[in-house]
Amino acid sequence: MRPSISYASDTSNKPSSLVLSQTWQKGGSCPKGTIPIRRIQRHDLLRATSLEHFGRDGPKTFTVENSTNDKSGYHYGTKAESFSLPDHSAAYLRTTGSGYVGARGDINIWSPRIDLADDYSSAQIWLEGTNGNKFESIEVGWMANPKLFGDKQPRVFVRWTLDAYEKTGCINLICSGFVQTSQKIALGSAINPVSQDQGTQYEIKIRIDKDPNNGRWWLQFQDEAIGYWPGEILNALKQNAATVKWGGDVYSKNVKGVTPHTDTAMGSGYTPTTNPRADNFGHACFIRNLRIVDNSLQVKFPEAPQYVVEENNCYGTYQNEYCNRASILLWRAISK
Protein backbone atom coordinates (compact mmCIF):
# COMPACT_ATOMS: atom_id res chain seq x y z
CA MET A 1 0.00 0.00 0.00
CA ARG A 2 2.89 2.31 -0.81
CA PRO A 3 4.21 3.60 -4.16
CA SER A 4 6.60 1.07 -5.68
CA ILE A 5 8.84 3.76 -7.19
CA SER A 6 10.50 6.90 -5.85
CA TYR A 7 10.74 9.69 -8.42
CA ALA A 8 13.80 11.92 -8.63
CA SER A 9 13.49 14.86 -6.26
CA ASP A 10 13.95 18.53 -7.00
CA THR A 11 16.46 19.90 -4.48
CA SER A 12 15.18 23.46 -5.00
CA ASN A 13 11.74 22.42 -3.74
CA LYS A 14 12.31 22.95 -0.03
CA PRO A 15 9.87 21.40 2.44
CA SER A 16 7.18 23.62 3.89
CA SER A 17 8.07 25.09 7.27
CA LEU A 18 4.45 24.91 8.41
CA VAL A 19 2.86 21.49 8.84
CA LEU A 20 -0.72 20.78 7.81
CA SER A 21 -3.05 20.54 10.81
CA GLN A 22 -6.61 19.27 10.84
CA THR A 23 -9.23 19.92 13.53
CA TRP A 24 -10.09 16.24 14.06
CA GLN A 25 -6.50 15.47 15.08
CA LYS A 26 -7.04 17.31 18.37
CA GLY A 27 -9.08 14.30 19.49
CA GLY A 28 -6.37 11.74 18.80
CA SER A 29 -5.39 9.58 15.85
CA CYS A 30 -6.45 6.38 14.11
CA PRO A 31 -4.92 3.02 15.08
CA LYS A 32 -2.45 1.45 12.67
CA GLY A 33 -4.23 -0.39 9.89
CA THR A 34 -7.24 1.97 9.87
CA ILE A 35 -8.01 5.28 8.14
CA PRO A 36 -10.00 8.35 9.22
CA ILE A 37 -13.27 8.84 7.33
CA ARG A 38 -15.42 11.94 7.80
CA ARG A 39 -18.84 10.94 9.13
CA ILE A 40 -21.79 11.65 6.81
CA GLN A 41 -24.81 12.71 8.83
CA ARG A 42 -28.48 13.29 8.06
CA HIS A 43 -28.12 17.06 7.64
CA ASP A 44 -25.33 16.47 5.08
CA LEU A 45 -27.73 14.41 2.96
CA LEU A 46 -30.56 16.93 3.38
CA ARG A 47 -28.40 19.68 1.85
CA ALA A 48 -27.82 17.62 -1.29
CA THR A 49 -29.86 18.23 -4.45
CA SER A 50 -30.53 14.49 -4.53
CA LEU A 51 -29.09 11.34 -2.99
CA GLU A 52 -27.92 10.30 -6.46
CA HIS A 53 -25.97 13.54 -6.84
CA PHE A 54 -24.53 13.62 -3.30
CA GLY A 55 -20.73 13.53 -3.35
CA ARG A 56 -20.52 14.29 -7.04
CA ASP A 57 -19.52 17.60 -8.48
CA GLY A 58 -20.57 19.75 -11.40
CA PRO A 59 -23.90 19.94 -13.25
CA LYS A 60 -25.76 16.71 -13.98
CA THR A 61 -25.75 17.27 -17.75
CA PHE A 62 -24.00 19.85 -19.90
CA THR A 63 -21.99 20.40 -23.04
CA VAL A 64 -18.31 21.23 -22.75
CA GLU A 65 -17.42 24.40 -24.65
CA ASN A 66 -14.17 26.01 -25.72
CA SER A 67 -13.34 29.25 -23.92
CA THR A 68 -11.35 32.27 -24.98
CA ASN A 69 -8.73 33.71 -22.67
CA ASP A 70 -8.65 36.97 -20.82
CA LYS A 71 -6.75 40.03 -22.00
CA SER A 72 -6.53 41.77 -18.64
CA GLY A 73 -3.26 42.80 -17.05
CA TYR A 74 -3.36 40.17 -14.33
CA HIS A 75 -1.52 37.35 -15.98
CA TYR A 76 1.78 36.24 -17.38
CA GLY A 77 2.28 33.54 -19.98
CA THR A 78 0.93 32.31 -23.30
CA LYS A 79 -2.76 32.40 -24.19
CA ALA A 80 -4.50 29.04 -24.55
CA GLU A 81 -7.81 27.43 -25.40
CA SER A 82 -9.48 25.27 -22.76
CA PHE A 83 -12.71 23.57 -21.69
CA SER A 84 -15.26 25.79 -19.97
CA LEU A 85 -17.95 24.43 -17.65
CA PRO A 86 -21.35 26.01 -16.99
CA ASP A 87 -21.70 27.51 -13.49
CA HIS A 88 -17.91 27.50 -13.02
CA SER A 89 -15.49 30.40 -13.25
CA ALA A 90 -11.87 29.25 -13.32
CA ALA A 91 -8.50 31.01 -13.39
CA TYR A 92 -5.36 28.96 -13.73
CA LEU A 93 -1.97 28.35 -15.31
CA ARG A 94 -1.51 25.20 -17.32
CA THR A 95 1.06 23.25 -19.25
CA THR A 96 -0.02 21.06 -22.14
CA GLY A 97 1.93 18.37 -23.94
CA SER A 98 2.05 14.62 -23.55
CA GLY A 99 3.44 12.07 -21.19
CA TYR A 100 2.94 13.79 -17.81
CA VAL A 101 3.15 11.24 -15.02
CA GLY A 102 3.30 13.61 -12.06
CA ALA A 103 2.78 17.12 -10.75
CA ARG A 104 3.80 19.22 -7.75
CA GLY A 105 2.62 22.42 -6.08
CA ASP A 106 2.45 24.13 -2.69
CA ILE A 107 -1.05 25.60 -2.28
CA ASN A 108 -1.56 28.59 0.02
CA ILE A 109 -4.50 28.04 2.43
CA TRP A 110 -7.16 30.73 2.96
CA SER A 111 -10.77 30.90 4.11
CA PRO A 112 -12.44 32.68 1.17
CA ARG A 113 -15.67 34.63 1.28
CA ILE A 114 -18.62 32.43 0.19
CA ASP A 115 -21.65 34.44 -0.94
CA LEU A 116 -24.53 32.14 -1.93
CA ALA A 117 -25.63 28.93 -0.21
CA ASP A 118 -24.77 26.69 -3.17
CA ASP A 119 -21.45 28.39 -4.04
CA TYR A 120 -18.02 26.98 -3.39
CA SER A 121 -14.43 28.04 -3.97
CA SER A 122 -11.34 25.89 -4.43
CA ALA A 123 -7.58 26.17 -4.97
CA GLN A 124 -6.21 23.05 -6.61
CA ILE A 125 -4.11 21.04 -9.05
CA TRP A 126 -5.68 19.21 -11.99
CA LEU A 127 -4.20 16.42 -14.15
CA GLU A 128 -6.32 15.95 -17.25
CA GLY A 129 -6.70 13.85 -20.36
CA THR A 130 -9.22 14.03 -23.18
CA ASN A 131 -11.96 11.43 -23.28
CA GLY A 132 -13.81 11.95 -26.58
CA ASN A 133 -15.21 15.48 -26.56
CA LYS A 134 -14.98 15.68 -22.77
CA PHE A 135 -12.15 15.71 -20.29
CA GLU A 136 -11.04 13.24 -17.65
CA SER A 137 -9.32 14.52 -14.53
CA ILE A 138 -7.95 13.78 -11.09
CA GLU A 139 -7.81 16.77 -8.76
CA VAL A 140 -6.59 17.75 -5.31
CA GLY A 141 -6.40 20.87 -3.15
CA TRP A 142 -8.56 22.67 -0.61
CA MET A 143 -12.21 23.61 -0.95
CA ALA A 144 -14.67 25.81 0.98
CA ASN A 145 -18.03 24.20 0.20
CA PRO A 146 -20.84 24.86 2.73
CA LYS A 147 -23.45 22.85 0.84
CA LEU A 148 -21.32 19.70 0.94
CA PHE A 149 -19.57 20.15 4.29
CA GLY A 150 -21.97 22.33 6.29
CA ASP A 151 -19.64 25.30 6.90
CA LYS A 152 -17.30 27.68 5.07
CA GLN A 153 -14.01 26.34 6.40
CA PRO A 154 -11.35 25.24 3.89
CA ARG A 155 -11.09 21.47 3.72
CA VAL A 156 -8.74 19.05 1.98
CA PHE A 157 -10.40 17.38 -0.98
CA VAL A 158 -9.71 14.98 -3.85
CA ARG A 159 -11.93 14.54 -6.88
CA TRP A 160 -12.05 12.61 -10.16
CA THR A 161 -14.23 12.28 -13.25
CA LEU A 162 -14.18 10.39 -16.55
CA ASP A 163 -16.67 12.61 -18.42
CA ALA A 164 -16.36 16.20 -17.13
CA TYR A 165 -18.58 15.37 -14.11
CA GLU A 166 -21.59 14.44 -16.25
CA LYS A 167 -22.21 10.91 -14.96
CA THR A 168 -19.01 9.83 -13.22
CA GLY A 169 -16.83 11.21 -10.50
CA CYS A 170 -16.74 11.74 -6.79
CA ILE A 171 -15.40 14.02 -4.05
CA ASN A 172 -13.31 12.37 -1.32
CA LEU A 173 -14.54 9.00 -0.04
CA ILE A 174 -18.26 9.70 -0.35
CA CYS A 175 -18.48 7.21 -3.21
CA SER A 176 -16.11 4.72 -4.83
CA GLY A 177 -12.95 5.80 -6.60
CA PHE A 178 -10.05 7.16 -4.56
CA VAL A 179 -8.45 4.59 -2.24
CA GLN A 180 -7.09 6.03 1.02
CA THR A 181 -4.15 4.39 2.79
CA SER A 182 -3.08 7.05 5.33
CA GLN A 183 -4.17 6.99 8.96
CA LYS A 184 -3.04 10.60 9.46
CA ILE A 185 -5.06 12.76 7.03
CA ALA A 186 -8.87 12.88 6.90
CA LEU A 187 -10.26 13.95 3.55
CA GLY A 188 -12.94 16.60 4.07
CA SER A 189 -11.66 17.60 7.49
CA ALA A 190 -11.26 21.31 8.28
CA ILE A 191 -7.75 22.78 8.01
CA ASN A 192 -6.46 25.00 10.80
CA PRO A 193 -5.01 27.55 11.04
CA VAL A 194 -5.46 29.48 7.78
CA SER A 195 -3.43 32.31 6.26
CA GLN A 196 -4.07 35.94 7.25
CA ASP A 197 -3.55 39.04 5.13
CA GLN A 198 0.00 40.28 5.73
CA GLY A 199 0.30 37.65 8.45
CA THR A 200 1.51 34.07 8.83
CA GLN A 201 1.03 31.98 5.69
CA TYR A 202 0.08 28.30 5.62
CA GLU A 203 0.23 25.93 2.69
CA ILE A 204 -0.31 22.32 1.63
CA LYS A 205 2.62 20.66 -0.12
CA ILE A 206 1.02 18.42 -2.78
CA ARG A 207 2.63 15.73 -4.91
CA ILE A 208 0.93 13.41 -7.42
CA ASP A 209 2.83 10.56 -9.13
CA LYS A 210 1.83 7.69 -11.39
CA ASP A 211 3.25 4.31 -10.37
CA PRO A 212 4.31 2.65 -13.64
CA ASN A 213 4.26 -0.80 -12.07
CA ASN A 214 0.53 -0.86 -11.34
CA GLY A 215 -0.99 2.27 -12.95
CA ARG A 216 -1.98 3.90 -9.66
CA TRP A 217 -1.84 7.69 -9.32
CA TRP A 218 -0.46 8.26 -5.82
CA LEU A 219 -1.18 11.40 -3.80
CA GLN A 220 1.06 12.84 -1.09
CA PHE A 221 0.42 15.74 1.30
CA GLN A 222 3.59 17.10 2.87
CA ASP A 223 5.59 13.84 2.89
CA GLU A 224 2.67 11.55 3.74
CA ALA A 225 1.27 9.15 1.11
CA ILE A 226 -2.51 9.65 1.37
CA GLY A 227 -3.74 7.10 -1.15
CA TYR A 228 -4.28 6.58 -4.86
CA TRP A 229 -6.65 6.68 -7.82
CA PRO A 230 -6.66 3.11 -9.27
CA GLY A 231 -5.73 2.83 -12.91
CA GLU A 232 -8.71 0.49 -13.37
CA ILE A 233 -11.24 3.33 -12.97
CA LEU A 234 -9.52 5.56 -15.56
CA ASN A 235 -9.51 5.73 -19.34
CA ALA A 236 -7.54 8.65 -20.81
CA LEU A 237 -5.38 8.84 -17.67
CA LYS A 238 -4.60 5.16 -17.63
CA GLN A 239 -1.23 5.89 -19.30
CA ASN A 240 -0.45 9.57 -18.59
CA ALA A 241 -1.90 13.09 -18.48
CA ALA A 242 -1.89 15.56 -21.37
CA THR A 243 -2.49 18.67 -19.23
CA VAL A 244 -1.52 19.86 -15.75
CA LYS A 245 -3.26 22.91 -14.26
CA TRP A 246 -2.68 24.99 -11.11
CA GLY A 247 -5.24 27.56 -10.00
CA GLY A 248 -8.64 28.38 -8.60
CA ASP A 249 -12.27 27.61 -9.35
CA VAL A 250 -15.53 29.21 -8.20
CA TYR A 251 -18.79 27.30 -8.60
CA SER A 252 -21.97 29.37 -8.62
CA LYS A 253 -25.18 29.76 -10.60
CA ASN A 254 -24.38 33.49 -10.65
CA VAL A 255 -21.31 33.58 -12.90
CA LYS A 256 -20.69 34.16 -16.63
CA GLY A 257 -23.23 36.85 -17.38
CA VAL A 258 -25.74 36.18 -14.59
CA THR A 259 -26.72 39.36 -12.71
CA PRO A 260 -25.99 40.05 -9.94
CA HIS A 261 -22.65 38.22 -10.06
CA THR A 262 -21.79 36.14 -7.01
CA ASP A 263 -19.59 37.77 -4.39
CA THR A 264 -17.79 34.48 -3.70
CA ALA A 265 -14.01 34.97 -3.69
CA MET A 266 -11.31 32.85 -5.25
CA GLY A 267 -8.37 32.20 -2.92
CA SER A 268 -7.62 35.07 -0.54
CA GLY A 269 -9.89 37.58 -2.26
CA TYR A 270 -6.99 40.00 -2.80
CA THR A 271 -5.36 41.16 -6.01
CA PRO A 272 -1.68 40.45 -6.67
CA THR A 273 0.39 43.16 -8.25
CA THR A 274 1.72 42.74 -11.79
CA ASN A 275 5.10 44.19 -10.77
CA PRO A 276 7.40 41.16 -11.05
CA ARG A 277 9.62 42.37 -8.21
CA ALA A 278 6.80 43.14 -5.80
CA ASP A 279 6.14 40.67 -2.99
CA ASN A 280 2.59 39.26 -3.15
CA PHE A 281 3.42 36.80 -0.39
CA GLY A 282 0.98 37.23 2.48
CA HIS A 283 -1.60 39.07 0.39
CA ALA A 284 -2.64 37.21 -2.77
CA CYS A 285 -3.21 33.47 -2.67
CA PHE A 286 -0.42 31.59 -4.37
CA ILE A 287 0.60 28.20 -5.64
CA ARG A 288 4.37 27.95 -5.69
CA ASN A 289 7.02 25.38 -6.60
CA LEU A 290 5.08 24.34 -9.69
CA ARG A 291 6.63 21.20 -11.14
CA ILE A 292 5.78 18.38 -13.55
CA VAL A 293 7.15 14.87 -13.99
CA ASP A 294 7.42 13.58 -17.56
CA ASN A 295 8.23 10.15 -18.96
CA SER A 296 11.88 10.64 -18.07
CA LEU A 297 10.75 10.45 -14.42
CA GLN A 298 12.54 13.74 -13.72
CA VAL A 299 10.93 16.60 -11.77
CA LYS A 300 10.97 19.68 -14.00
CA PHE A 301 9.70 23.23 -14.32
CA PRO A 302 6.57 23.36 -16.54
CA GLU A 303 7.51 24.62 -20.00
CA ALA A 304 5.72 27.63 -21.56
CA PRO A 305 2.88 27.84 -19.01
CA GLN A 306 -0.38 29.15 -20.45
CA TYR A 307 -3.04 31.19 -18.70
CA VAL A 308 -6.79 30.67 -18.85
CA VAL A 309 -9.14 33.15 -17.18
CA GLU A 310 -12.85 32.74 -17.82
CA GLU A 311 -14.03 36.03 -16.26
CA ASN A 312 -11.24 38.58 -16.44
CA ASN A 313 -13.26 41.29 -14.68
CA CYS A 314 -13.80 39.03 -11.67
CA TYR A 315 -10.88 36.63 -11.26
CA GLY A 316 -7.47 36.08 -12.78
CA THR A 317 -3.95 34.71 -12.56
CA TYR A 318 -0.49 36.18 -12.45
CA GLN A 319 2.71 34.16 -12.69
CA ASN A 320 5.53 35.83 -10.81
CA GLU A 321 8.66 34.29 -12.30
CA TYR A 322 10.94 36.53 -10.27
CA CYS A 323 9.65 34.99 -7.06
CA ASN A 324 9.26 31.48 -8.57
CA ARG A 325 5.65 31.62 -7.47
CA ALA A 326 2.32 31.59 -9.29
CA SER A 327 -0.32 33.78 -7.67
CA ILE A 328 -3.97 33.08 -8.24
CA LEU A 329 -6.33 35.99 -7.81
CA LEU A 330 -9.11 35.75 -5.29
CA TRP A 331 -10.95 38.99 -5.94
CA ARG A 332 -14.01 40.57 -7.51
CA ALA A 333 -14.05 43.72 -9.59
CA ILE A 334 -17.81 43.86 -10.19
CA SER A 335 -19.91 46.09 -7.98
CA LYS A 336 -23.48 45.00 -7.31
Image (spheres, rainbow, N blue to C red):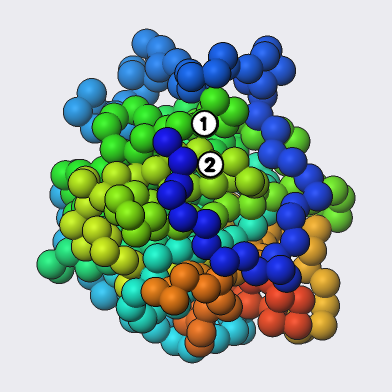
Give percent across and percent down for residue 10: 65, 69
Front-lying residue, 312 or 318 = 318
Give percent across and percent down for residue 251: 41, 50
Q: Which mark is residue 225?
A: 2
Give percent across and percent down for residue 214: 30, 50
Front-lying residue, 134 or 225 = 225
Who's the residue at 17% across and 64% down the image?
131
Which quadrant holds the C terminus? bottom right
Residue type beneath disc 1: Ser
Horizontal side of 91 relative to 74 (left or right) equals: left
Who's the residue at 46% across and 55% down the image?
5
Tell me: residue 190, above or below residue 266: above
Horizontal side of 274 relative to 264 (left or right) equals: right
Front-lying residue, 29 or 263 = 29
Mark 2–mark 1 distance (CA, rounded to whole Å): 6 Å
Residue type beneath disc 2: Ala
Horizontal side of 81 relative to 1 (left or right) equals: left
Who's the residue at 52% across and 57% down the image?
6
Tell me: residue 307, above or below residue 289: below
Q: Which quadrant holds residue 240?
A: bottom left
Q: Which quadrant holds residue 135?
A: bottom left
Tell me: residue 125, above or below residue 133: above
Who's the residue at 67% across and 14% down the image?
28
Mark 2 or mark 1: whose residue is earlier in sequence: 1
Front-lying residue, 301 or 92 = 301
Q: In this figure, which residue is indicated by the disc labeled 1?
A: 182
Callout 2 secondary element: strand
